[in-house]
Amino acid sequence: KLADTLPVSEKAWRMGGSKMFVQIGSMVPVEDLIRGMIVDSGNDACIVLAESISGSEEQFAELMNQTGQKLGLTHSNFRNSTGWPDADHHMSCRDIATLAWHIIHDFPQYYHYDSEKTFKYNNIEQGNRNPLVQHGTADGLKTGHTDAGGYGLVASTLRNGRRVILVLNGMASMRERSEEGERLIDWAFANFED
């Protein structure tokens, strides 16, 4: 339940990359962890959720793989809950779009978190890392970056009753990701029909 609280392990607290800044040994509400994961791209929040659901992040990655197969993700393999670089961790753009569709359609009661522009936790307010959400161009979903993959993003927006889901990767900078994302969403609405 959203109001349930989950414990923060040392592993979660020490995790690098983007964080929501949970404190070791504290108990954090599930709703805050979801917001920290989505808005702040909090790797620490991902690990708290994974450990609480499956006992360990490794066991959660196995659950992710099982669930991915049920959803039809045919070109994905998960090794962790965060997307942290691993030679065996990967997703195709099509699988990311498929997963985005399921998030939007299977869990509409939670999708509003994706459009939050800021989230404050532990007296630290952070802006949504998705520039298309910040600009009002999209209502979700996530950004990402690795040295191997460059800057990427999965975004979605609804215009005049039509929803577009966009996945892009390999951008050289956050600015290029933002500009190309907005350009492609506009192009998709102008050049495709249902």
Image (spheres, rainbow, N blue to C red):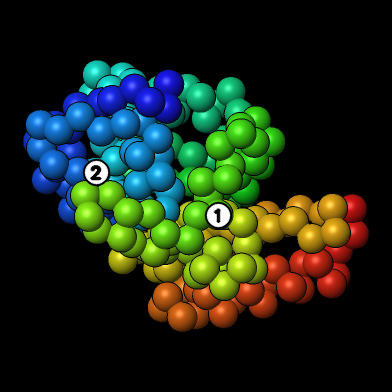
Q: Are marks 1 and 2 in contact (CB under 8 Å)?
A: no
User: Which residue is painted at 46% across and 80% down in the image?
Assistant: 175
Furthest residue in direction front, as rendered? 123
In the image, 7: left or right of 73?
A: left
- In this rendering, the answer to whether 35 lies above or below 68 is below
User: Which residue is painted at 52% across and 30% down in the image?
Assistant: 68
In the image, 45: left or right of 178?
A: left
Residue on which the image places disc 1: 115
Q: Quadrant of the N terminus?
A: top left
Tag 1's secondary structure? Answer: helix
In the image, 102: left or right of 34?
A: right
Give the amino acid at mark 1.
Ser
Label 2: how many Cα within 10 Å (few below 14, some 14–19, many 20+): many
Residue on which the image places disc 2: 44
Rendering coords of residue 64 (x, y %)? 43, 29
User: Which residue is painted at 48% across and 61% down in the image?
Assistant: 117
Give the amino acid at mark 2.
Asp
Relative depth, front residue between 11 and 69: 11
Image quadrant where residue 23 sits: top left
Relative depth, front residue between 89 and 163: 163
Q: Can residue 89 be seen here?
A: no
Relative depth, front residue between 31 and 96: 31
The mark found on residue 193 in the picture is none
User: Which residue is painted at 30% across and 60% down in the image?
Assistant: 125
Separation of residues labelled 1 and 2 (CA atoms): 21 Å
Q: Can residue 29 be seen here?
A: yes
Label 1: how many Cα within 10 Å (few below 14, some 14–19, many 20+): many
Relative depth, front residue between 85 and 56: 56
Image quadrant where residue 155 sits: bottom right
- Foreground disc of the pair 1, 2: 1
- In this rendering, the answer to whether 74 lies above or below 170 is above
Rendering coords of residue 91 (x, y %)? 48, 46
